[in-house]
Amino acid sequence: MKILKEIKLGDEGRDFLRGHLADGNTLSRCLLEYCDLNVGEVVTHLPGDINAKEAKRFSTGGKHKDFRPAVRRILVDGKTWMTMEEKPDTVAHLAGLIREFLGKDRTLCIFEAAQCSPTDPWLRPDDERIRTLDDEVYFALGKNDAADEGKITGTIRDAYSDWHFVCVMSSLPEEDLLSIRGKILTEGDVKVMAERAEKIAVRAYDGEGFVVWDRVR
């Protein structure tokens, strides 16, 4: 996978983040109400030829439009082989951030599946990721999922919609983790996750990337 570069988004990034959350469900509302988004930093990760001005055009795609596969020549046993560098994958990059975060103790990653309803037939009752709050659906991943790259990537895609995506990474006391391990969430559970959020990722660039808020930078 081709390496993406980090671009700092400043106040424009905070404004976009707040606007995206305003269209969400209970988790998004609690983030706006209980998480201090003025601290930390807002960044994105895009191909190296995208400048800061273009990165702040959050609603437009085309961020990979100038991508040309790079040819690399590798010498093996006296023979030259040509290989192509892969197009940057922002989903894989986000999955890497989640995997690193879940490697820490007492961590949880929760996704707001705004397009889902608890009665959707494709949601399996035995899916351990699923949490519900009234008629809202969430997916949760914990420390035990940190090494499962496929599960993390699959959860990003399952929670994604064409208009909304919110992923929250929180560090929680053990008693709150125990409560959230149940299938049914309360608004109090969601409030705690919002208050203790360390990273938030939202959909941007017409689905080509993400904007990420990081509390601890």
Image: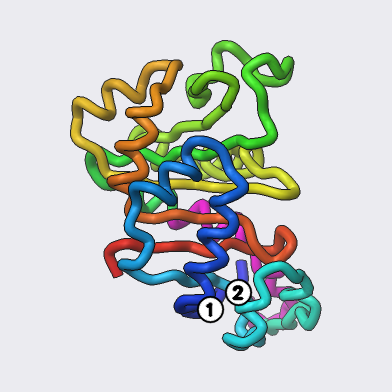
Please tell me which of labels 2 and 1 falls first in the chain.
1
Q: Quadrant of the C terminus?
A: bottom left
Question: Relative to 102, does residue 121 appear above or below in the rendering?
Answer: above
Where are the magenta residues, as a range? Answer: 74-97
Residue type, mark 2 in image: Leu
In x, y percent, where is residue 89?
A: 64, 62
Determine whether, in the image, residue 179 is placed left or right of residue 52: left
Question: Relative to 195, does residue 208 appear above or below in the rendering?
Answer: below
Quarter of the view holding residue 124 = top right
In x, y percent, where is residue 175?
A: 20, 25
Determine whether, in the image, residue 187 is placed left or right of residue 89: left
Q: Can you tell which mark lies on residue 5?
A: 1
Residue type, mark 1 in image: Lys
Element at badge 1? Answer: strand
Question: Relative to 113, does residue 103 appear above or below in the rendering?
Answer: below
Q: Are marks 2 and 1 in contact (CB under 8 Å)?
A: yes
Determine whether, in the image, residue 141 is placed left or right of residue 150: left
Q: Quadrant of the N terminus?
A: bottom right
Front in this rendered view, residue 17 or 8 = 17
Q: Residue at x 69, y 66 (%)?
A: 205
Residue 67 on the magenta segment: no
Label 2 to label 1: alpha-carbon separation? 6 Å
Which color scheme does this rendered protein use? rainbow
**What residue would you read off at disc 2?**
46
Confirm whether residue 102 shows in the render: no
